[in-house]
Every structure is written in structure tokens, then in C-alpha cells.
Image (cartoon, helix red, strand yellow):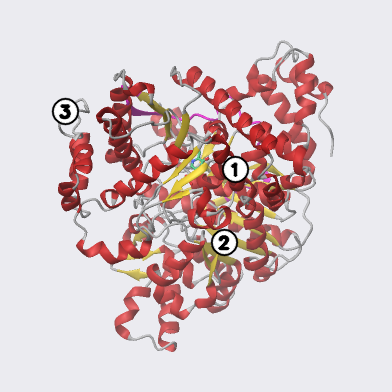
Amino acid sequence: MNRITSQNIETFLLQNYGKSIKTASTIELYNAVSRVALGCVADKMYSNSGKKRAGYLSAEYLVGRVIYANLYNMGEIDTVRKILEEKGIDLEKFEEIEDLALGNGGLGRLAACFLDSAATCSIPLDGYGIRYRYGLFKQSLVDGFQTEGADDWQRFGDPWSIRREEDVVEIVFGDQEVKAVPYDMPIIGYGGDMVNTLRLWQSEPKVPFDFIAFNDEKYSDAVKEKNRAEDISRILYPKDDTYEGKKLRLKQQYLFSSASLQDIVRKLKRAGRSPKDIGEYYSLQLNDTHPVVAIPELIRILVEEEELSFSTALKIAEKVFAYTNHTIMPEALEKWDVKLFKAVLPKVYPYVRKINSSLKNQLKKLNIPQEELKKYSIIEDNKIFMARMAIYATHSINGVAQIHTEILKNTALPEWYKIYPQRFNNKTNGITQRRWLALANQELSSLISTKIGEGWITDLSQLKALEKLKGDEEFLHQLREVKQLKKNQLAAYIEKNEGIKIDTSFIFDVQIKRLHEYKRQLLNAFSILDTYYGIKEGRIKDFKPTVYIFGAKAAPGYFRAKGIIKLINEISRLIREDPVVNKFMQVVFISNYNVSYAEKIVPAADISEQISTAGTEASGTGNMKLMLNGALTIGTYDGANVEIVQQAGEENNYIFGARVEDIAEIEASYNPSALIEKNPRLKVVVEALIDGTLRDEGTEMFQELYDSITEGASWHKPDHYYLMLDFIDYCDTRLRANQDFKDPRLIAEKSLMNIANAGSFSSDRTIKQYAEEIWQLGNK
Ligand SMILES: *Cc1c(COP(=O)(O)O)cnc(C)c1O
């Protein structure tokens, strides 16, 4: 690998801007360092060993800031720091560079962690996705309300991407034809030996500009087709965990699915191989149902262009594809209207029908009774069920945490488990320790490395060796010092960014994740209110001062989620204005939560709030990041929380609330109003929504939240995420944790046990399991 030198950087700056390191702007410097670094690895991007590769098909990649992670993995971060320092420039300057946010939340961040892990573990895995013109919206808070702005991430260029004109493909829709243009980003493994590719497709017009229309002075007509083509990759849909049957969204899905397959088939041919052998050379993982249209598309290509029979093509698809399920919530499951699908993809629809017929035949052979066929049917009630197609026409379906996979097998998809038990498997999610420990928390990383060496950077299970330091007073003391340092740093950042001062002697209690009812930020808010009244009334004594930190974006059209943001900010005001309680409590809602913000909050957290209703959070990965950085989890038995406490010990975390089985049992007879009437503490916090204690400025947001708990709505029963059921246990558990914090040594020990047992939550472990058990790469 070539090395980055100050000479290379100076040359780039001179050639491109007529400047030097000393005179260049931050953006210019960023472009120069990035381009020079890219030049050091680009040759490796396009070297193919000829062995079987895997492809990750994902509509989202939540990458965050790329420059530090890339330089770190290349082993060049200290070199660049030195080069800049010699000119009096701080490497931290690049924090002005915005995040690459081509994803909503956990699902997109998982994709980014997997790419880092695969390249590090020498697994040939390429990512395929969409190059959105605008990433996830920027959030600001105005009077406590969320407002949204566009994320114009390409404004200052995109120095980490290479546009590959020679790999352009054509995409045919029912009402338009476009070009898909690939942009490649290097995915650099730790140590810099392996460089994989993230290939993002951008939609462009086949004809750039209608010259004749322009000549006739029809100016807007002249650019109409151009805009229509560019619309397809213009925006990332900002809905997390809900599904809407939008035409443009189907076009996005087909754009990157079809383009990626055409690309792979062409690569095979260029290498002198037959596309019918695609299964020998490629395994393709479908990240949720967003790329499932790739299944009929591959079959179409094999039948129409390679003249294979349908049944042969279907068998090939089954061998090539595997499907990851991320949610069982019905509102998130994709099903396309047949009429819409046919209009947008008339050439693909016949293959969906054929897949469905083939399924029907198969079910007959298996003697599935007539009345059960509907449950399996891919086309039913004029809808196409994408998850069903993904199970039928692939060889693997995996859940993303043990409990989630069990729910898939036994509750969500038992009919499929009955006929294809061997297809179901679990791959518990993970996170990359390079970004979430080595880069985000250099102080803790150094402390760990002085004790057990640096092996954990590529083998996180080595953290287990820290357990022997449990009784080491000096080490526990150092752990506390690091945590305090990270809290100080976060407080300084929040003061600079939000204009809010935080007392760093307070406990930092953190809930950071997308705003969604099932994640129950509202339960957290209610419990904070309960504590507020408890302190005022004298019911709660000796409370250890706590700052509650929230970070979350709500989908712009999700009225109730936005109401919860306003509510948290109102509770913040109530407490701030109370001279007695504000010595013990503070609530801070930071704005524009994203990967870079997470990198600052995660190392500073004392407490990690993971309080989703049991059975709703498939895995979670935020929980893992916080655990790895020594936060103690207050959580329900849900998603990966279950495995976290299995590993780190229930005694070192705080588990509360109803389990999946408990909820199943009481579901039918659940009556939140009866609970509210019975317990005045519930009543007080719920009534605070409507009795004038808290104000929503006439938006009726709080009334709507109140109704959602007490009455329900047309689409759900009252309190459908069981806040009232878990409320008292949650408040009690939080107080128990609060009292434990009076013994800093005890907390440091629990914290140590969490760090030492976070090894299995590395995405290195996860991606190796995919490679060995699903993709059968064997050459890792
Ligand atoms: C890790 C991460 C998430 C996922 O958090 P969960 O708590 O697992 O939902 C979402 N957004 C960002 C920016 C993240 O870094």
C-alpha cells in the first residue's frame, strides 16, 4: 500500500485549488487528504481473487463520518495528524465534515458495521445500495418541536467515491427508462490488507437534456425527463419501521436490485463464466425485504437473457439468495399493491406470478390443506407479500437475536417453519469495535490495551481477560476516571452545540435511538415525571442527581412521535424552572442525533435505556455500543438485551418488566385504565398530559398521546405498547440503580463486567457466521 505523505497532499491542493496545507479551507483539506488516501487503496478495490464473493443488498447504509475510520483502518491516522500538526492544524478540524447518513437507524448502521467487519476479517463482501441525493433529514428543535431540513451531503463534494461510467446499466420501468450509474466507495479492512467495495447506484436520464424542446423555448419540458429520472434516487424515505406503498419507493428498490444483478452477471461474463453458475461465485444477502424484488429479477434475467427454464432459474435464485428479517411488526412488512407493481414493473410481475404458482405446487406436494394455503400465498387480496417470497425463494431466513429468531419460528412465521425448518437460523447482530471503541473512546481503548494488549481490536472476545481485574482497585479507579473524562467532553460538546450546560457530577442516563412508540421513550418520560413528583413530595429521598439525555429523530409524518419529543422538552422545562428539583434532575434532548453524535454520547453514558416492549425490538445495536463502553443497561427482556445480560450477568444490569410470555397471557384482557385508576402515581403522570401542567402550544399533541394510552385509536387498542403495565416496575428498577450509584466502586465493577463480556457483540463474530453458515465462502 502506498503511504500518505505531506508532499501528496500539497500536490493535490496545488493542482486542484492553487493552495497549500496552510492556506486551504477545511473542505479543501478534507478533499485532499481523502483523495490521497483513496489513491493509496483504490488498486486493491478492483482486485478480485476469483473465489466466491458475497454481496450485501441493502437500501440503507448509515455510514457516519468516513475519514477517521478509513485513516484508522489504513493505519495512517497518526501520520495525517502529524502532517497537519506541523502546519498548526488540528485533525479534529474534520469534525466539521458532515455524516454520510444514507440510512435511518439500526438497519442501516448494521450494514455499515458489517462492511467494516468483513473487510477486516478478509471476507470478500461488497455492499450494494442507493446513492441518495439527500440522506436522512437534519433535525432542529424550535420551541421544543422537531423541524426538518434537507441533508445536502454532496454539497462539498464526495472525495471517497469513484464514478464508474464503464459499469453503467439500463433500468426499465413501465413508464420510463433510466441509467443506473455506480459510485464506488472503498471499504478498508483494519490493517489495510483487504479493500472491499460499497457500490451505490444513482439514477440518471438516458438522454441528459431534451435539446429540441429547449430550442422551442419549452424550458421546463427540456429538463422534465431529467428530473423524473433523478427523482428515483433523490431521497431516502425517513420512515423507520413503517411501510408505505409508494411508487417511487418501489422504483428505488428495483433500481438498485436490478442494477446490482446486471452488474454481477456482466462481471461473470467478463471473467468468461456462465451466468447459470452464479451460485458458485456469489451469495447475496437481502437486508430486510427492501431488495426482495431482486429474486424475480434474477429469474427474469436467467430466463430471458440466458434462456434457462423457469424452474432451473428458481433453483439458482434459491441457492444465491438469503434473507434477513428485521421486524415482525405488521405495519413494517412490505406488501405491494398488484396494480402498482404491474404498472411499475410489467416485465417482472409475470415472474412473481410464476414463483407464486410454483409455491402452490410445492404446498400441494407437502399436503398442506386447502384452507391453510392463504397464509403462504405470495399474491393474495391483490397484494404481493415480499417476506413470503423471500422465504420461499431463498435457502436461508435469519433473525437478528436469539429471542427474535424464536419468535419468528414459533409465533410470527410458524407455518413456514413447519415446512422449511432447516432454512431458519439466527445471526445475532453486532457492532464494529473499531468505530465504537477504538475510535469513539480512545481513552478507554488505551487503558484496555495497557492491560491486555491490542488483540481485542480484531478479536473482541479477548476483552474477557479484563475480568481478572475485578478486584484491582487501581484499574477500577482508572475506569471511573475515563468515564468522567468522557462525560466532561460530552458536556462541553452539548454546551457548544445545544447551548445547554450540564453538571458532570450527575449520572448520565441515556436513551438514544429513533423515536418510535415501541421503543417507549414515552415510558421514560412518564418515569422522569414520577421521579420529579417523588422528589417534590418527599416520597423519594437521597436521590442521586441525574441528567436524562435523549437523542432521536421522528419520521416527519409521525405526529405522535413528534408529540413525544415536545413532551420531553416540556418536562425538561418544568424541571429546569423548579429550583428545588433542578438540583437533582435535568432533561436534555440533543438535536440531530446521528452516528457522530452517538460516538460522543456512547462513551459518556452511565446508564443505557433499552426499554422496548418485550417482543418488539428485534435486536438493537445501540444496547451493544453502550455496553462495550461500560454503561449499565436498564432494560426489558427483549432483543439482544437478553443475550447482553446472559453474557454480563443480570446482577450487573437492571432488568424489569413483562416478558413476551407475560404479555401473550394478558393481551386479550389488558385494561390500562383500570391500572391508572388503581394507582395514583400512574394517574398523576398520565393526567399531566391534559391538566395544564405541560403545554403543547395548541397542537393537541398531548391530548392525542393521552388518548393513545386511555382510549386507543382506530388502528389500535389502548396503550398497545404496555407502558402502564411496566410503569411501576420500571420506576422502582431505576430507583434501585440510582441508589447503587452511591457506591462508585460497585458501579465500576459492574461496568467492568459489561465491558469484559461484550466480546460476542462484535460484528466480526456476526459476519463470520454469515460467511460460514449462510454464504459458505469457506475461504475467509
Ligand atoms: C446504533 C445506532 C442506531 C440503532 O440504535 P438502537 O438503539 O439499536 O435502535 C440508530 N441510529 C444511530 C445513529 C446509531 O448509531
Secondary structure of the residue carrying numbered label 2? loop
Q: In the rendered view, does 560 fall on the left or right side of 494?
A: left
Mark 1 lies within 8 Å of ligand 1 (Cβ measured): no
The correct choice, above or below, for 24 with respect to 283 in the image is above
Give the x, y percent position of residue 780. Answer: 75, 60
Which disc number belongs to residue 749? 1
What is the crowding at mark 1: few (fewer than 14 residues within 10 Å), some, or many (at least 20)?
Answer: many
Query: Which quadrant of the structure image shows residue 412?
Result: bottom left
Q: Are marks 1 and 2 in contact (CB under 8 Å)?
A: no
Q: Identify the residue at horizontal 49%, vertical 47% (top origin).
A: 106
Q: Is residue 396 magenta?
A: no
In magenta, the rendered stretch is: 142-169
Three-letter code for the amino acid on which mark 3 is drawn: Gly
Q: Identify the residue at horizontal 33%, vertical 55% (top origin).
A: 331
Q: Does the magenta stretch include residue 167?
A: yes
What is the crowding at mark 3: few (fewer than 14 residues within 10 Å), some, or many (at least 20)?
Answer: few
Query: Which quadrant of the structure image shows residue 221?
Result: top left
Give the x, y percent position of residue 335. Answer: 36, 60
For disc 2, the marked residue is 427
Which disc number belongs to residue 590? none
